[in-house]
Amino acid sequence: MRQIFLFVSLAVLGFGFYLKFFYDVPDSQIQINFFVSWFLIIVGGASISMNLFWSGSKRKNNNDA
Amino acid sequence: MNKKVIAIFVITIAALAMLWAYAFGPLSGTITPKANPASLQPTATQTTVNNQNVAFNAYHNRDLAENFYTIKFPQTWQSQSSTQVGSYQFTFSNGSGSAGLQDVADNTTLELFVLSQDEPNFKKTVPGYSRINYQKISVNGNDAYQLTYHSTASGSDYETVKTYIAGVDHAAVITLAAKQSDFANMQPLFTSILNSFQWENK
């Protein structure tokens, strides 16, 4: 389950970077592209961080036990 | 719950709030490109048109990073304020001239854009539109597509030459219009303006 969550988070982050740096944005859609690409980058990055920290805390608890 | 996870969650919410402010809120003015003041300061030059020296202003447009360009317009033409980034507009007795940048999507070509989007749009919006000529030309080594058409305004007949010059991201569009009775006389000057166009970072 954790691997699936991590994979989806990486996909979201990657798609955000694609929209930010490689997608040809029409002049009329600069604002929406700015919002969507950064939204995906932030959410993707935060999801990966939370996933890693969460599993780290579980490992620590297991070791303590 | 892990304190670090909660901290990341809170920081993420704060970052998303800041993102909204930059994209659509009070700080949104920083995203959209703005005209560079340097683009509006011309340098004076002289060019020979029909064996006569004509005073021109050379404009060096620095608005969009991938599409810096230079173009010359006669000093006698009156500059009109333009709100569009990368564009200039002028009027003179019996006509007008303009230069600007046109975004062309990656999934089309400039020629396809001209024939399938811009020209059909003119047919709907320009009074008395009728095509006189369409041709592929070269402007200082750049592929270009030139549309010449007839239109009417305020009871007068006009002829307009619209030239689309291929560029890296955007295309340049130079529009030169004159009353039909004056068009032949203006042709050498129009050709001189068109040939003065150059991409600066190609």
Image: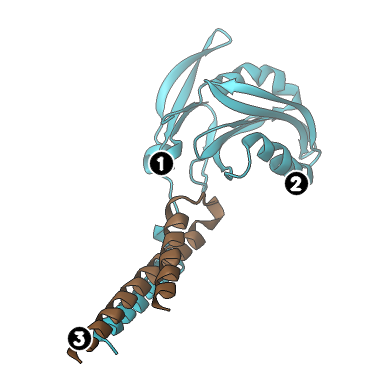
Chain colours: A brown, B cyan
Amino acid type of disc 2?
Answer: Thr
- Residue B201, horizontal then vertical, whole percent: 41, 31
Any part of residue B158 in sight: no
Residue located at (51% from left, 26% from top): B197
The reply to whether discs 3 and 1 touch (Cβ–Cβ < 8 Å) is no
Figure quadrant of the N terminus of chain B: bottom left
Q: Nearer the viewer, mark 3 or mark 2?
A: 3
Residue on which the image places disc 1: B65
- Establish if B107 lies above or below A45: above
Q: Which image quadrant for residue B193? A: top right
Q: Which image quadrant for residue B200? A: top left
Q: Secondary structure at mark 3?
A: helix
Q: Which numbered marker is on residue A42?
A: none
Q: Which numbered marker is on residue A63?
A: 3
Residue located at (38% from left, 43% from top): B37
Residue located at (33% from left, 80% from top): B9
Q: Which numbered marker is on residue B125?
A: 2
B90 or B39, which lies in front? B39
- Left or right: residue B33 versus residue A62 is right
